[in-house]
Image: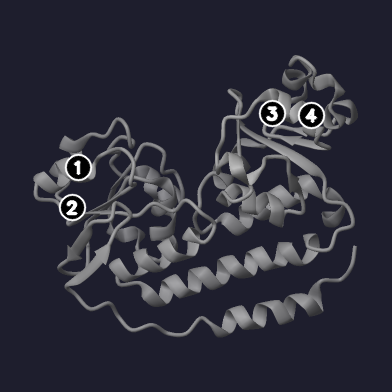
Amino acid sequence: MFNPRPTLILALSGLLAGAAHAAPTRYPLTVTDDLGRKVTVKAEPMRVISVLPSNTETICALGACSKLIGVDTFSDFPAQVTKLPRVGGLYDPNIETMIALKPDLVIVSKYGKLAEPLTRAGINVVAVNPESYDDIFTKTLLLGKILNRQTQAQQVITTVKRDVARVEVLTRNVKSKPLTYFEIDPTPYSIGPNSFMGVLLTKAGARNVIPAALGDFPKVDPELIVKSNPALILGVDLKTVQGRPGWKAIQAVKTGRVVEIPMDLNTVLGRPGPRIGQALLGLAKIVHPELFK
């Protein structure tokens, strides 16, 4: 393994230079949210509900965890949010609980149709829905602006990009980048190369068997995987794939390079938020364990 230190220092110097101090947010603030709505935030939000785990993590990374008064069913990081009232999920929300908590802002996904009933109830709602890799950074900036944490948002972005760069400097020039199939659901669903998870897979030093034309999170024909003959299969166990018609002939199955993602890593990989550098490191250790001995 080569020494990444000189290259890494050069790569990180540019990132650190961008972490300038930002001015406080001026209110009232009008933003266009991910539902295409113009939303005006009249004053700095002090009582916030988050209905998306990635947003919850970002809010806390911005140093605004104390503003949270409620979170969705699946928000579990950092540990302090597990003590907050639960308001349901995107598709089974408890709107009555949200209203009773008297928030001055609810941050929702663009899915789940929560904006309309909450707005009718007189609650300010903004949809912030990170989906792509670049969204991790743009939505961090947006949340930082809304919550008057703009300097902290820039610091979070600098940290995430530094963590990503530390892995990329190892994986970028590896001699062999295994052709990889990543299964996220046994239906089977996978990840396209342009999805945020697909970008992470590439940055981890792998080649994705899924064509970009199929979309970001496509349902795939199992025959496509057999024909692609990946050298590495992620997200499912060896016994399961051995039981699928034709899959025993796949290189990854013959060599035993079928890896079920540990639950903790799987959770982080599925959240486009501030821990994405940690997710990339965990993924890279699976794809190229030889780099981390």
Residue found at x 23% / y 78%? 26
Marks 4 and 2: CB-CB under 8 Å? no
Q: Do we see residue 147 in this rendering?
A: no
The secondary structure type at the circle numbered 4 is helix
Please identify, in this view, whether the residue under mark 1 or under mark 4 is nearer the observer: 4
Per the image, the residue denoted by label 1 is 98
Per the image, the residue denoted by label 2 is 103
Mark 1 Cα-neighbour bin, 10 Å: few <14, some 14–19, many ≥20: many
How many numbered markers are drawn? 4
Mark 4 residue type: Lys
Q: Earlier in the sequence, mark 3 or mark 2?
A: 2
Residue found at x 68% / y 49%? 201
Please identify, in this view, whether the residue under mark 3 or under mark 4 is nearer the observer: 4
**Rounded to the nearest whole Å, what is the CA distance between mark 4 and mark 2?**
53 Å
Per the image, the residue denoted by label 4 is 227
Per the image, the residue denoted by label 3 is 236
**Rounded to the nearest whole Å, what is the CA distance between mark 1 and mark 2?**
7 Å
Q: Earlier in the sequence, mark 3 or mark 4?
A: 4
The secondary structure type at the circle numbered 3 is loop
Please identify, in this view, whether the residue under mark 4 or under mark 2 is nearer the observer: 4
Mark 2 residue type: Pro
